[in-house]
Amino acid sequence: MRSLQRARRPAIIAKRLCTVLDTLSPCSPSDWASTDKRFTRAGTTLQQFKSNSEQFQEEYLQTVNGKSSSLSRRFGLFSKHWCSDFLRVVSDSVSNQSVPSCRHFSSEPLLDLTPEVSTDDVSDMLVDSFGRKHTYLRISLTERCNLRCKYCMPEEGVALSPKTQLLSQDEIIKLASLFVAGGVNKIRLTGGEPTIRHDIEEICTRLKNLEGLKNIAITTNGLVLARKLPQLKAAGLDQLNISLDTLVPAKFELLTRRKGHAKVLHSIETAIEMGYDPVKINCVVMRDFNDDEVIDFVELTRYKPVNVRFIEFMPFDGNVWNSKKLVSYAELLSLVRSRFPSLMRLKDHSSDTAKNYTVQGFQGTVSFITSMTQHFCSGCNRLRLMADGNLKVCLFGPSEVSLRDAIRSGVDDSGLQEIISCAVKRKKAAHAGMFELARTQNRPMIHIGG
């Protein structure tokens, strides 16, 4: 235990250095040396630093799993020769920034494809005790789904809430209007599978009429999307994410316990034809299942306006998570770079969950959702309203508060706003870390909403 505690400190530093590294990766070593001679005095090159940072992050996982104990022994040398000078260069160049920008080290800025969204009009109700402004609400429309994905629900299924315990359309709109009036400018509809809710088009239409709401998005498995998309677009759907974890039909059936791979591909093509740009493709990467398809997914971005989003495998009740299945961001990034050396870092919005890249000359983009190895809690602006009316301020936190019960017991708008505000103020600074999360009881993902 004592050696593990010693190992964790260098591992945390190594992960932070990796975060700095991928932001600065478009810079060449010569840029660094000419911009600040102290980097040269650190006694290394950018590529040596990259190799060692990723090695320490990977060895951290092995240490926690009892496979390695050398991390803490070798970190002393790493720290002595590199960390001090390197971090001084970073801290002197960037003030009040959790991740520096390449513009501090090179004349070539990061490519910026992310529009800035003002958060000036956010009410205190949506500001937590750490100053984070919550402008993004995810609403689960149903607990039901027409797939049975292994990472989303246990093989035996889950107990579903009776229909009377789920939010009605009027209750969804009432609560959404309170959040939008408080400063929420983006709503994403999730599930379960949101497209199987019969009134989803009407919900979209009513949400679109809320003054101040700028974006309506949906996360879907794509099985019936192609048929419903024309009506959804007419109702005001601005953006969509389609879940697709494999390009191999047989593996799709193995993972989802259902057929339908061709229908998902057809939905992606339909969305592209209807002008959605980008069409976001969510891919949960699991070792020894689909990690051999990462390059094939990146190839999808060559000629199509898609954003492939590689998501680290996350622990939820019933999905039999373990660290051996996790393919880390560092490993994924190294794999993609080995095949596509021209991979370029894009500038992310401060509240982005993704680390965004593009391959030079490709039409689409590639992103990495690093919830487990490099969390993004400090910029989190998300709240979740589940299908049963419970408000969840953190995806990985077990605490919830029922807004459904409050509405049905006659609580007025000011009372609802107070309940929401108290829940937001209790939000923690960050989640507990992947190994603690694996031991913490939480709902299955199908209950929470994807």
Image (cartoon, rainbow, N blue to C red):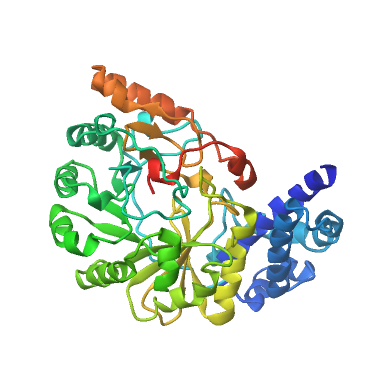
Location of residue 358 with respect to 174 vertically, above or below:
below
Location of residue 196 with respect to 269 vertically, above or below:
above
Q: Quadrant of the N terminus?
A: top right
Residue 132 at x, y percent in the picture: 45, 39
> Residue at horizontal 49%, vertical 30%?
129
Residue 380 at x, y percent in the picture: 46, 44
Residue 331 at x, y percent in the picture: 61, 67
Residue 414 falls in image quadrant: top left
- Left or right: 104 in relation to 237: right
* Whether residue 88 is visible: no
* Whether residue 253 is visible: yes
> Residue at horizontal 59%, vertical 55%?
94
Q: Farthest front residue?
A: 156
**Relative to the observer, which residue lies in front, 243 or 12?**
243
- Left or right: 279 in relation to 397: left
> Residue at horizontal 32%, vertical 73%?
305
**Relative to the observer, which residue lies in front, 18 or 96?**
18
Residue 221 at x, y percent in the picture: 33, 58
> Residue at horizontal 44%, vertical 54%?
352
